Image (cartoon, rainbow, N blue to C red):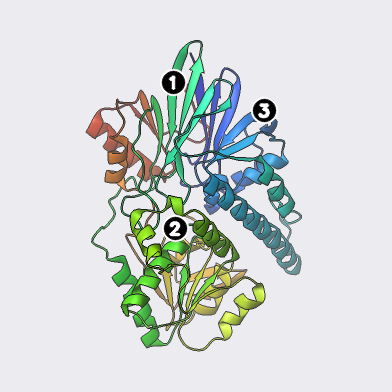
Amino acid sequence: MQARLRFLGAARNVTGSRHLLEADGTQILVDCGLYQERQFASRNWDPFDVPPAKIHAVLLTHAHLDHCGLLPKLVKEGFQGRIYCTAATAEIARIILLDAAKIQEEDAAYKKKRHKKEGRTGPYDDAPLYTVKDAEVCAPLFAPVPYGQEVQVAPGLHATFSEAGHVLGSSFINVNVRQNGETRDVLFSGDVGRTHRPIIRDPDAVKEGDYVLVESTYGDRRHDDRTDIKAAIAKVINTAQEAGGNIIVPSFALERSQELLYFISELLREGTIPHLMVFLDSPMASAITKVFKRHPELYDPQMRRTLQNRESPFDFPGVKYTETTKESKAINAIKGTIIVIAGSGMCTAGRIKHHLVNNVTRPESTIMFVGYQAVGTLGRRIVDGDPEVRILGENYPIKARIVQIQGFSAHADREELLHWLSTLPKPPRKLFVIHGEAESAQSFGRYVHEKTGWEVVVPDYREEAILS
């Protein structure tokens, strides 16, 4: 038998996850993500390497934008197959894609207006990458499947979704290729989570994988488990209140925002922080939190016990979910210290930009980062200490206190990834290291080879591999 893989995204970079598997003339795509690094953003506009109409199905590991964010473009350009994923991922992806489409439309209109004022023209001023209507057309194509149940996604191709422990509904996917009486298992890790994280369950063990694609976002380092996340958050909040400033938290709408509410609610119950107003200023995060409430079967035991005690981390005194733009703007008129959690997590779009404009020049305010900041993003430039950044077309000096809370990652580190891979019942024929910056991917590849002796490849963008 012979099958082939093409690495169409997240190859020696973190975002834009897209992997094409072809067997016996049938093509399926695993993930269809948006590039978020500035240096790769132009790839979002490129035509797909394969005509979308020829792709039989899409398998979605989870609903983060860098894994699902190009689905509307794929559909707009001719894809008519089904999008297989877990039920929670389907619900969250619909929310995220509609939000992304709205931002695409708003950004295109804003840039067109600004460039016209400046006398400039650009290649993408006239239209967004995709529209809300394009995102809505995706919704009927989602085909929810339960964890652990094999489903035929194309002739000769069967997929099984397992708990990845990364975000609610996340999966790693085993694709069983059956040709001419032979079988091969191709395992796609998606993003692998960590054990003992709040709210959701730990990753499942791996049961098979002749060929394995593994992420490497943190493949070159170990997480500092000495970090007491709750204590670190409490220190930031108490220090900002003493200074009389706000705490602005760029946060991903999926998982990270819910984890923040989880920790803040615990700190409030323990009396470790003052009772400040907490704004979840993200309609998308608010909608996703409702999905969390609808899927208690995906919670870990500790979260279930918390709910049994009638102490929901998503509803506590002082928390407010802002929906409208008017409500969001009104936050800036509030005197005294407040906590604002807003998207996007890497400061690439959304309401966080407006809160940064109102706070980055204030020495008394704190910008608290709680997630990974990809190279080239606004969040990365702030974390790296750039003295001045450009936000919404204007330059602003960074005077606010910048804090990055470690230990918050939903990605497994080097040791955790190796432990996850070690649950394979036998060595894979080949391991492909993806979804990491070039240095991280190469470092993890060397580390795995040294520890196991496995054949390891760090593929380039658009590289093809034969799975014989």
Which is nearer the N-term, disc 3 or disc 2?
A: 3
Q: Is residue 218 above or below residue 277?
A: above
* Residue occupied by mark 1: 184
Q: Residues within 10 Å of mark 2 (few under 14, many from 20)?
A: some
Q: Is residue 146 above or below residue 233?
A: above
Judging depth in this view, the residue of 308 and 424 nearest the camera is 308
| Label tally | 3
Secondary structure, mark 2, is loop
Q: Is residue 450 above or below residue 111?
A: above
Residue 373: assigned label: 2
* Amino acid at circle 1: Arg
State if disc 2 and disc 3 touch (CB < 8 Å): no
Q: Residues within 10 Å of mark 3 (few under 14, many from 20)?
A: some
Q: Position of residue 411 (x, y in %)?
A: 38, 50
Q: Is residue 406 left or right of residue 258?
A: left
Q: Position of residue 379 (x, y in %)?
A: 47, 63
Which is nearer the N-term, disc 2 or disc 1?
A: 1
Q: Is residue 59 left or right of residue 311?
A: right
* Amino acid at circle 2: Gln
Q: Of discs 1 and 3, which sits in the foreground?
A: 1
Q: CA distance from mark 1 to mark 3?
A: 23 Å
* Residue occupied by mark 3: 54
Check the picture and name the quadrant holding the C terminus: top left
Q: Residue furthest top?
A: 180
Q: Is residue 180 left or right of residue 368?
A: right
Q: Residues within 10 Å of mark 1 (few under 14, many from 20)?
A: many
Q: Quadrant of residue 223?
A: bottom left
Secondary structure, mark 3, is helix
Secondary structure, mark 1, is strand
